[in-house]
């Protein structure tokens, strides 16, 4: 059955919608914490808590409060906490407990505390187990002529571990520790789409960010129902028709130039990777393609694209 | 002291930030309800509940649950509920209880229930007493030349009841019952800025909406701490430099063409009407003027501009 645009952005329940449903749902998770900080940094699914081989000298588990806390000395620094996390993840890899850990990326994602304080970093593929906020940058490359807008849409390689063969945004990438959004999008535009650095630096436009709490399903590969709160910084790049993005690694199969109608149809068929659908809808809203008069779920979609994150976030200034 | 951009968008507390603060704050309000619908339609300040002369045959007050319910027969229609509301407001006007009711507008604002069902309408100036969601359309008229963007910014007349002499968006207006956003902005562009209908229809672009829960302060005139959840549909209109907006009623004193720096300075001085500040920030974010690298509260601001409404909302399709 065709997906509505609202189907593409449904995420974690909202307290405002139904506080009972919200609270019941939270019982499925433990709060991930770090000693010394009175804040929840992520949500860990109960089944993950049961299976993960938590080293006793590193972790404190409170089953009544449903919290699991990485315990480090009061004067611990991010490097020390990261080392404790790395040891713990290595134990889990050794025990072969989790499918998602088989997709080792060798990229480090940061975890921030109150006020955006950098607390630790961890291997990218482990982040859904801890439900921490991850950061990325997505860019829509488009051309405009007398017939309207057309979008450069890549298809992911069949061999990708996550979301193989699905449609993607022109350029998209996760931000590792220390990266800033603008430099991330410039780097990814070269690496993923062979777009010349000078063109991207001169013409790419920062146009906002989308924030949401994604719940992983089978398309992601690995365990399902894991939580991924995501911040995606959003960029538009209007390209001259002479500039053609090209794959330059084995992550992308091909780029195609799709019309608005073709993108809408692919969205309705669920062909876009979930977080890329969200970026396309945000583009459609900002460019007057989806309007309050043609999209019945307009308000609901706009709010869900900009969810207040349930955990501390970073600043890049 | 100069206001930060985050100061301009601070609103009602968020459950996600601190559920204790959120729940404590809600104790200052009664939930406004309509019999037959299991949903909160607005928040009424306790001091309003105490002073309002609630006709006993129309209203049911539950002090323990902090709810106040308009009681209508099971088969009542919107016209009947609106009549009961009008009678109640007329009693309050007669008793002279509220400053805000002295600003009678003779415009009717709608109240929607679950699924966007139209339940009743009420006089515009009474809506902050009930804390219902109100709807408007705001348009930023701008020109672009080699020196950058400039904005057509009107100053409100000294004689306006609300926010006199403050800066406003090029065109902005509330939506009465039955209006749709696009027609509202076309009408207001003619009425408030003398912009030709054909130019607006051809060039105005729907670019999203902002949603937030404003808490009224003294600048609004009348009682303070009243709640105004607002939905503002947002439009951009790039104008040819030859098109000059002109006041055409007594609500606007003058239009001035301000640079980005001049708008930023006026925002920092708190010169913009609060909901118009929010529209300017949204424009700055969508047009790459505020970015993740130059605005320390970027994520916080973007989420606060797109709050999930705590009450049912309408669809305009």
Image (spheres, coloured by chain):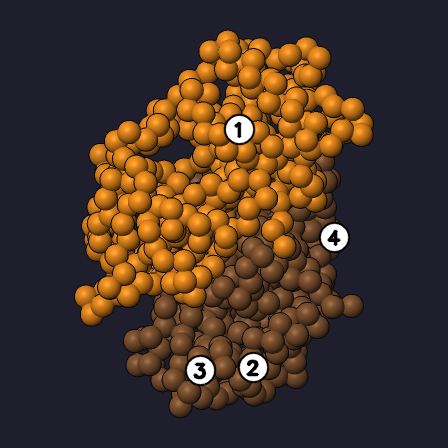
Chain colours: A brown, B orange
Q: Which residue is mark 2?
A: A258
| Image mark 3: chain | A
Pointer 1 with pointer 2, Cβ within 8 A: no
Can you say which quadrant of the picture contains the C terminus of chain A?
bottom left
Position in image of residue A111 (x %, y %): 48, 54
Q: Earlier in the sequence, mark 4 or mark 3?
A: 4
Left or right for B158, reference B10: left
Of the pair B236 and B178, the residue shown nearer to us: B178
| Image mark 1: chain | B
Can you say which quadrant of the picture contains the N terminus of chain A?
bottom right
Count of numbered tags: 4
Residue at horizontal 66 percent and vertical 74 percent from the top: A265
Of the pair A226 and A192, the residue shown nearer to us: A192
Q: Which residue is mark 4?
A: A47
Q: Which mark is residue A145?
A: 3
| Image mark 2: chain | A
Q: Disc 2 on helix, strand or loop?
A: strand
């Amino acid at each position: 059955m065709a997906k509505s645009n609202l189907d593409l952005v449904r995420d974690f329940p909202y307290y405002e919608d139904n506080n009972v449903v919200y609270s019941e749902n939270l019982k499925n998770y433990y709060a991930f914490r770090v000693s010394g900080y009175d804040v929840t940094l992520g949500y860990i699914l109960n089944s993950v808590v049961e299976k993960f081989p938590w080293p006793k000298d590193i972790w404190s588990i409170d089953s009544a409060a449903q919290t699991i806390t990485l315990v480090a000395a009061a004067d611990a620094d991010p490097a020390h906490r990261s080392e404790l996390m790395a040891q713990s993840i290595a134990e889990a890899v050794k025990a072969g407990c989790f499918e998602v850990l088989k997709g080792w990326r060798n990229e480090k994602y940061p975890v921030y505390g109150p006020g955006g304080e950098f607390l630790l970093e961890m291997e990218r593929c482990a982040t859904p187990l801890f439900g921490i906020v991850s950061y990325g940058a997505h860019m829509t490359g488009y051309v405009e002529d007398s017939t309207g807008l057309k979008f450069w849409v890549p298809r992911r390689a069949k061999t990708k571990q996550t979301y193989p063969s699905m449609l993607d945004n022109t350029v998209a990438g996760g931000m590792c520790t220390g990266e800033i959004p603008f430099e991330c999008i410039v780097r990814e535009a070269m690496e993923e789409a062979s777009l010349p650095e000078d063109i991207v630096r001169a013409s790419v436009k920062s146009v906002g960010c989308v924030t949401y709490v994604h719940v992983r399903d089978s398309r992601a590969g690995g365990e399902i129902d894991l939580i991924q709160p995501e911040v995606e910084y959003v960029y538009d790049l209007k390209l001259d028709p002479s500039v053609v993005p090209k794959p330059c690694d084995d992550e992308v199969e091909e780029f195609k130039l799709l019309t608005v109608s073709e993108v809408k149809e692919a969205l309705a068929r669920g062909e876009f990777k979930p977080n890329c659908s969200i970026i396309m809808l945000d583009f459609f809203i900002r460019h007057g393609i989806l309007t309050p008069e043609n999209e019945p779920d307009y308000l609901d979609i706009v709010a869900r694209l900009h969810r207040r994150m349930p955990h501390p976030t970073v600043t890049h200034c």
